[in-house]
Amino acid sequence: ESIDVDAKTLNRFVMACTHDHSLCILMNAIGTSCKLITSAVQRAGVAKLYGLAGEVNSTGDDQKKLDVLSNDMMINALVNSGVCSVLVSEENEEPIIVPPGKAGKFCVAFDPLDGSSNIDCNVSVGTIFSVYERKPGSNGTVDDLLRSGMECVCA
C-alpha cells in the first residue's frame, strides 16, 4: 500500500469548491479549535477538568469545566481569525460582537461541546456550528444569524 502524498485537506477542499479565502480561514479556525477541544477532553481526567464550573449557561444548564474551557478556545480562535463579526454561543447569554479591527464577513453560532452533560459517562461529544454571511449593509448583529437555514453558508 502506498501513502497518499496528495491528500485532500479541508483547506484544499474548501478552496476548490468556493475559492473563498475568508471561508478557508474560518474553517481552519474552527478545525483548530475542535482539535484543541479534543485534546482537552482526552486529558480531562488527568487535568481535573471534570465536574461543574459553578456557572449556568444561556439555556439554564449547569456549566461544566470543560464547557467553559471549550467555549473560551472556540471564541479565541474565531475572534482572532479576522473573518468573523458576530459569535453566538450556547454558553453565553449575549452575542459576542467582534471588535472592528478584527471583524470580518461571517457570523457563527456554535455549541463548542455538545453532549457535555453526559461526558462523565464516557459518551460521544462534539462541536456544532452554523455559519452565515453578514447581511449587506450590516455591521454585524444577532439578526445576521436569525435567518433561514437556506442562507446558511455551512454547518
Image (cartoon, rainbow, N blue to C red):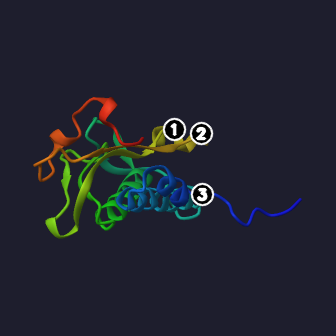
Query: Quick one: SS at disc 2?
Result: loop
Residue at x 55% of width, y 44% of height? 120
Distance between mark 1 and mark 3 Cα atoms:
15 Å
The residue to which callout 1 is attached is 118
**Three-letter code for the amino acid on which mark 1 is drawn:** Asn
Judge by depth and name the residue closer to the eye, 77 or 55.
Answer: 77
Q: Position of residue 150 (x, y in %)?
A: 33, 30
Q: Position of residue 43 (x, y in %)?
A: 58, 61
**Three-letter code for the amino acid on which mark 2 is drawn:** Val
Residue at x 17% of width, y 44% of height? 135
The residue to which callout 3 is attached is 42
**Three-letter code for the amino acid on which mark 3 is drawn:** Gln
Eyeballing the image, is 146 above or below 122? Answer: above
Judge by depth and name the residue closer to the eye, 113 or 35.
Answer: 35
Evaluate if marks 2 and 1 touch, with contact meaning CB atoms under 8 Å apart. Answer: yes
Distance between mark 2 and mark 1 Cα atoms:
6 Å
Residue at x 40% of width, y 42% of height? 154
Q: For residue 44, say whether it is visible.
A: no
